[in-house]
Every structure is written in structure tokens, then in C-alpha cells.
Amino acid sequence: MELKDLVLKNRSYRRFDQEIPVGLETLRQLVDLARLSASGGNLQPLKYILVADPLKNAQVFSCLAWAGYLKEWPGPVEGERPSAYIVILGDKNIRQNVGCDHGIAAQSILLGATERGLGGCMIGSIRQEKLRQVLEIPPHCEILLVIALGKPKESVEIEAVGPEGEIKYWRSDDGTHHVPKRSLDEIIVG
């Protein structure tokens, strides 16, 4: 699959086939892609927690908020929740501010997941202290992102931003998730 195809398939999926597991070895392979990715100053301050156990998944799920633009939707229902999570941490003993390292790592993880027929969603809306307790995260590690992973159970369509300029994603009656994207000419300056 060409890179552009991977990028087009790599959407923020929020509903998954919960019955299809994602194993720890797959999560390790995805984190290995992140490990091999660029890091500011090559300091490599990121650490990862892998979660693929259904009971632990439920605990992590309770620490997350889903789809801010879909105010009436509380998140995926049982049976449509992620099969696994990768929690990205910044080790403050290595570097106080990780810059954009976690974004680079998360994109590498999600492209690798897409290549394997999986989907995911970067989640930054996290009940930090609750997740810290659930996963026993040490105080020197900052919680940066949670990546939800699984076999996608929804269709996500990219479309052009309409004439009103509305960029909020939305769901149609058939459950398709629509994501407006600005045009290339609009985002290139000069």
C-alpha cells in the first residue's frame, strides 16, 4: 500500500469490533515503529504502556472522553469499544517537554495499525489522575496521549469543507462519520 493510501485509510475511528483482539505482540510491533521514528535531539523521552486485557481495557475506557463535536454521543457502546490501548508517556527524567515527539510517534503507530487492517484514535481528553491510578503510572511520567486500537466498525468519509467553512466532524443517519478537510490551496500560504 502506498503512503498516501495509508494516510487516507488512517482516520480517527471511534467504533470497533470489540470481539477481535489486538495482541500484545502487535502492540509491541507498533511501539517499535514509534521507537524508530524521529525524536527531538534524539533524546527519546517517550515511554509506553500496552493494554490488551479486556478488564484493564474497561478501566482505561472509563478514563477517556470521546468525540467532542458529537455532544449527544457518550462514546462507543459495549461491543464497539477498543480492543487495545497504547498510552504514550513523557519521561520527565529525560526531558521536561517532549515537544512534538508524541505526535510523531502516534502517527507512526496509527500508520502501522492501518497497514495491519486495524484502526485507531488519538485521545487527548483524559481523566489524568484516574488513569494514573488505574495503570500505576509513576509521577515522573506525564500522560500525553492514549491511542485506542481495534478493528474498525465504522465508515469514515473525508469531504471538502462546505461553503460555510464548517470543519466539525459529524455522523449521518446511517452512522457514517464525516470529516471535512480544508482544500490544499487554502492551507498553502504564499
Image: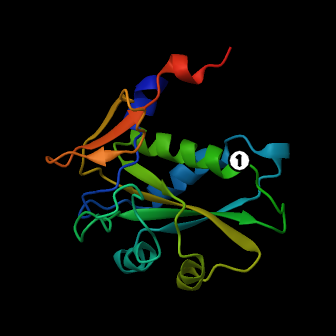
**Residue at the far top in the pictured view:** 190
Residue 129 position, x and y percent, is: 60, 82
- Residue lying furthest front: 164
Q: In this view, does 36 lie to the left or right of 8?
A: right
Height in image: 6 above or below 171?
above
Q: Quadrant of the C terminus?
A: top right
Question: Which type of secondary structure does the marked residue at label 1 adopt?
Answer: loop
Residue at 38%, 42% in the rendered image: 116
Classify 10 Å Cα crowding around label 1: few (below 14), some (14-19), many (20 and above): few
The residue positioned 28% from the left and 57% from the top of the image is: 16
Quadrant in the picture for the N terminus? top left
Residue 45's place in the image compared with 106, above or below, is below
Image quadrant where residue 133 sits: bottom right
Q: Where is residue 68 in the image (x, y as percent from the top left)?
A: 42, 59
Judging by the rendered image, the residue that carries numbered circle 1 is: 100
Q: Where is residue 3 in the image (x, y as percent from the top left)?
A: 48, 26
On the rendered structure, is 156 left or right of 45? left
